[in-house]
Amino acid sequence: MSTPTTQAPETGTARVKRGMAEQLKGGVIMDVVTPEQAKIAEDAGAVAVMALERVPADIRKDGGVARMSDPDMIEGIINAVSIPVMAKSRIGHFVEAQVLQSLGVDYIDESEVLTPADEVNHSDKWAFTTPFVCGATNLGEALRRIAEGAAMIRSKGEAGTGNVVEAVRHLRQIKNEIARLRGYDNHELYAAAKELRAPYELVKEVAELGKLPVVLFSAGGVATPADAALMRQLGAEGVFVGSGIFKSGDPAKRAAAIVKATTFYDDPKIIADASRNLGEAMVGINCDTLPEAERYANRGW
Amino acid sequence: MRAAHRWYIGKAVLSVSTPTIGVLALQGDVREHLVALAAADALARPVRRPEELAEIDGLVIPGGESTTMSKLAVIFGLLEPLRERIRAGMPVYGTCAGMIMLADKLLDGREDQETLGGIDMIVRRNAFGRQNESFEAAIEMAGIEGAPVEGVFIRAPWVESTGADTEVLATYDGHTVAVRQGNVLATSFHPELTGDHRVHALFVAMVRERAAAGSR
């Protein structure tokens, strides 16, 4: 080995940000509101936790403006666990994102679950060292977020409902649109970019790769091991579980069961075993009775 | 496993010298390793069950979350069979979380965190810091000819100390980031994210050598 020379390290590169999400694949990211819950999540095999003050189901119930969580609370969770910690900023609230970066969170979720701070612009995510994950309901939305610097995409689903129907809709939509692009020739990709309202270069990249250039997770309504496995069989590379775990009867058991089903998503026997005796699932809301104004997926564009 | 056929990545025409290398697919960047191994002329396949270990000549433990991987390895009965294969000389390569899994001893791990072991070393988890400190740097690695390897370090561990039989292959900023002991190789960084397949080629050569030695 030659004499070791230390080169200046380059932080915050696209490869390091997107690469972080690659490490989360096949895993479950769980919403937690206390250090104790964070420990339960880590014990259950979560690959990361999302630190927030209220889970989406409670945000729904309480109403009012939902904002970034208290820094003390986020730091308490960072100190409690050894796995990565994510936290949410409001859409377009780049100062909340700056605060989260300064706290040392590992990923920022610019999330529709919080009340949007800007009805026109999302945050410029290239300006940050901390990587961002953003929600999307379709391919154009996903690519607009990636153009703004998102290093990971998740389906929006409908958070806090315990109903997986919207997550299924969004994931199928994204996968179908990707499959359609695969069949287009070079002439058609320009018009496709116009229709998708997304940069041509990204549209072309997706057509060539047959997938997004970043990791795609599912979020919004996953409540059972079978829900998690469903999302993975539909093409999600991992799942976020929000209210589904700590709004259920036996969070530790349900969390571990969802982790197992996410890894063995194509093995019904293991999913069956994981689904036994989990106690009460969260109650759940029927999305078709949800008023338009209460649909979080409509936030962001 | 019904979906398995979608996962196989490799050469359509097999020769006797094409080793089959598994990628531990409990969690992590499995796909990137399958692609890199295929590019380095191995037949690569994901493995998640003890019985699937019988089919492989070597194993890659990918990057990911080591606490999750370790927990799933225990629950699904992979820990002992894997330790057995490693003791019997099966070549293994671990990146990042994979390096943690191959450490005989851990610092800053969870108290109940099980590793497979295989390399006489003490590894410190998340030693380079949190995600904001994750970085890229050029790494000179013994056994890799030509330009330095592009080192992608993500919440990366480093090797705190090594035993007498453990060879240090690379250091960064005074810390050991690549090691080999016998048939077991580990790096703190992620060559699978770079498109440069030289480290995987080195590992495939190790697997080939081992297979040739076994058949003599």
Image (cartoon, coloured by chain):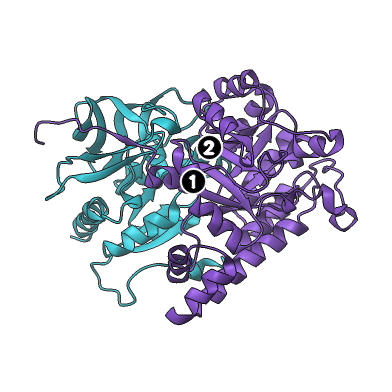
Chain colours: A purple, B cyan
Residue type pointed to by label 2: Tyr
* Farthest left residue in view: A2
Q: Secondary structure at mark 1?
A: helix
Q: Is residue A272 visible?
A: no
Instruction: Tell me: B214 left or right of A164.
Output: left
> Residue sitting at 37 percent across and 42 percent down?
A13
- Please, is residue B118 above or below residue A135 in the view? above
The answer to whether residue B56 is above or below residue B134 is below
Question: Looking at the image, do the residues carrying marks 1 and 2 touch, with CB atoms under 8 Å apart?
Answer: yes
B122 relative to A99 in the view: left or right: left
Question: SS of the residue at dot 2?
Answer: strand
Looking at the image, which residue is at 44% across and 50% down?
B29
- Vertical arrangement, residue A23 with respect to residue B57, above or below: above
Residue A116 image-quadrant placement: top right
The local crowd at label 1, few if under 14, some if 14 to 19, many if 20 or more residues have their Cα within 10 Å, is: many
Mark 2 packing: few (<14 Cα in 10 Å), some, or many (20+)? many
Q: Relative to the observer, which residue lies in front, A271 or A206? A: A206
- Of mark 1 and mark 2, the one earlier in the sequence is 1
In the rendered image, is residue A42 in sight? yes
Camera-side mark, 1 or 2: 2
Q: Which mark is residue A21?
A: 1
Q: Quadrant of the C terminus of chain B?
A: bottom left
- Percent x, y for residue A89? 62, 35
Subunit ID for the residue under disc 2: A
Q: Three-letter amino acid code at disc 1?
A: Ala
Question: Residue B13's x, y, as percent?
Answer: 30, 77
Residue matched to label 2: A107
B109 or B192: nearer the eye?
Answer: B192
Q: What x and y, as percent, mark residue A130?
A: 47, 36
